Amino acid sequence: MAAPDDLPLRRFTLIEVNDAKVPLCLRLATSLAAKIAADLGADVLKIEPPGGDPVRRAPPFLPQGGSALFQFLNTSKRSLVLDVASDAGRAALRGLLQKADAVLFEEPAASARLLRASRATPIEIAAFPVEMDAAARPVSEFTILALGGLLHMVGEPERKPLRLGGHQASYAAGLTAFTGLAAALAARDAGQTAPDVRVSLAEVMQWVNWKAASGADAGGTSPGREGKNSEFQIVPCRDGHVAVVYTVTQWPATRSLIGDPRLGDPKFNTRADRRQHIAELYEIITPWFADKTRAEIQTTAQAKGVPFGPIFSPAELLETEQYVARGFLADMDHPTLGALRLPQLPVQWNGRSFAPRPAPELAA
């Protein structure tokens, strides 16, 4: 494990401000950006409202009690409770900001004007672009996913859209905010004026779902839920399911892997031809998977250069070769919750993994 003195952001001090009335989706994005910085060595002070960050009471919950979500998002941070709506709280926050390199916060925040005016570089996370002038508009992660077109991509076309699992929009925005934070810290470190950073979930989802815009530009319609007409589908195998995925250049290898002479028919030669005859194509290739396990399929396909992928349950992911090799799960001793196993940063620094500290207890 990397020692604290070896971590790349150890010389920076950051403030994370959680306003009590901010929507959950923004709060999670801010916490993730600050978590990455904290696990990379930055001194992150988390400012919580009276009663604590509402995420402390958000599901899913640990068997020992407490929010697993909070424990994941707040590793390696310190905590301080401040009522930033009060004069005393704002005065205390103003003093803390004089010693910070950057401050992460959400719009709309009660102390937003103070945060933007401090010497600390502001890293702001909002729901919508400035041009929409929609700070007071109700927002949830579900509505952001809908606006970004992601709900149009998931589920069967004859049924209602499916919500993506977890917090995809918030985490993508948090990663984007951390990227902006890293650029700002690099500028400060070089003696330059650091740019202010503003990230909106709506714009991030437009970037995540870039195929919607490019598809509409190329073909006149945005790609959506195609069901059994989809080019790439999930098919059953002996012990579960496998995702059938391949590029245009990998079609000859895919055809060779399946080994059915019917795939040599000219109507399957081009991508356009295969999409036109997609039902017949899957009628031919699906039986090849039925008597094989996911592991057998993956090994055989990779040997041919075909990226068929097994579908894992969350429990199975804990034991997958890649997660184990990268040390993706960290074991830690929490002072009140005992032994915890949480995901950690899936990156290494100088070839070594990080050892995050448990999330802080609620402090006065």
Image (tube, rainbow, N blue to C red):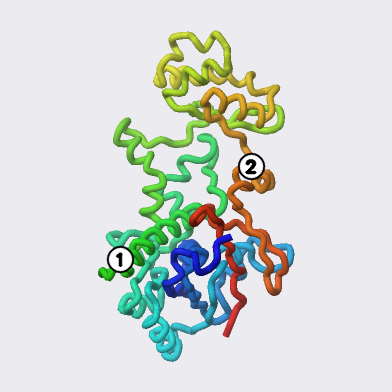
Q: In the rendering, which numbered label is found on residue 269?
A: none
Residue at image position (48%, 35%) is 225
> Label 1: how many residues lie within 10 Å, few (<14), some (14-19) or many (20+)?
some
Q: Quadrant of the C terminus?
A: bottom right
Asked whether residue 362 appears in the rendered view, the answer is yes
Q: Position of residue 157 (x, y in %)?
A: 51, 35
Q: Position of residue 110 (x, y in %)?
A: 40, 78
Q: In the image, is 108 to the left or to the right of 290?
A: left
> Label 2: how many residues lie within 10 Å, few (<14), some (14-19) or many (20+)?
few
Question: Is residue 196 placed above or below 255 in the rendered structure?
Answer: below
Q: In the image, is 139 to the left or to the right of 65?
A: left
Residue reaching furthest to the left: 193
Q: Position of residue 287 (x, y in %)?
A: 64, 19
Q: Position of residue 129 (x, y in %)?
A: 32, 59
Q: In the image, is 202 to the left or to the right of 323?
A: left
Q: Quadrant of the N terminus?
A: bottom right
Tag 2: amino acid: Glu
Question: Is residue 103 placed above or below 88 in the rendered structure?
Answer: above
Q: Which residue is mark 2?
A: 321
Whether pointer 2 and pointer 1 mark residues with C-beta atoms closer than 8 Å, the reply is no
Q: In the rendering, which numbered label is found on residue 187?
A: 1
> Tag 2's secondary structure?
helix
Residue at image position (48%, 31%) is 226
